[in-house]
Amino acid sequence: MNSIKRNMVRKIRKIIEKNEKFLVLSHIEPDGDSVGSVIALAEGINFIKGKRCTAYYPVDIPQRLRFLVKRRNIARKIKNLDHDVAFILDCSNISRIAGLSLSELKHMTIVNIDHHISNLYFGDINWVEPEMSSVGEMIFEIFSNMQLPRLALEGIYTALITDTGKFTYKNVTERTLKTAAKLVRLGVEPYKIASYLYHNFPHNFLNILGLALLNAKRLLDGKVLF
């Protein structure tokens, strides 16, 4: 871990240590990294004695990711915003935040954790690491010195496998694979996560996919399928 990353991790751990009530948000159009990271961070903080963390996602979660949320009460509405800290995950800019505006969060400490190079650094604390495969990998760094519940580990693994295209994209590094190996050693079952994500599609989805492929057009001498 380089010195900049080490300092950011230390700073975020201190924020968690010194505060009690936390809110975790992510972007519209949820994906494996956003949902997995929200679950992992909320579960990790709630696992610490004396801490309370609300995972807020006021949108429909895709069916293939619902295995992460069925055992976790994700808030669809927020009655009051009396939290000390708001973690905003995987959002390159404030217009992407699902459900709340930055003005509604201004009384909280805003911690912006992201791996997109286009991030606008809108937080009070901005940990942006474009070389990281996923925000899930960054969340694992925060808790690398602590115990995590199973659901948090599964959330991080989901973030890794989806944002790396099943570990096939160019963003996969030795660190990414080592993180995945650690998660497996801690109890994550890769075949179980893969079955939820890639092997259990509803019939309606397969019909739509079939229609899409049937009507696909080839462009640029077959290099692009549209």
Image: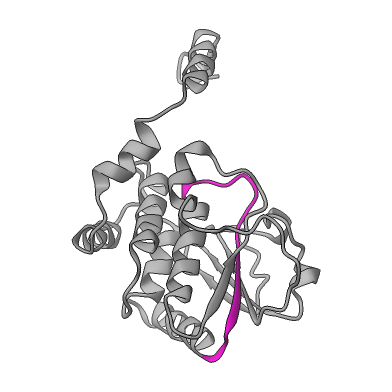
| Quarter residue 132 falls in | bottom left
| Quadrant location of the C terminus in the rendered image | top right
Q: Is residue 87 above or below residue 31?
A: below
Side of 173 relative to 162 (left or right): left
Query: Would you say residue 150 sits in the magenta stretch?
Result: no
Q: Is residue 169 above or below residue 72?
A: above
Colour logic: one colour
Which region of the structure is painted magenta? Answer: 18-32
Q: Residue at x 74, y 61 (%)?
A: 100
Determine the residue positioned at 71% across, 61% down: 94
Give x and y (percent) for residue 84: 65, 82
Magenta residue check for 20: yes
Percent x, y for residue 189?
Answer: 24, 50
In this rendered view, identify the residue nearer to me: 24 or 78: 78
Answer yes or no: is residue 170 visible: yes
Tell me the quarter of the picture where residue 153 sits.
bottom left
Q: Is residue 22 above or below residue 191?
A: below
| Residue 96 relative to residue 50: left or right | right
Q: Is residue 29 left or right of residue 5?
A: right
- Outermost residue to the left: 185
- Tell me: 2 left or right of 101: left
Tally the marks: 0
Residue 115 spot, x, y in % from top left: 50, 60
Q: Mark yes or no: residue 131 visible.
A: no
Which quadrant, please, contains the N terminus? bottom left
Residue at x-position 62% and y-position 43% = 60
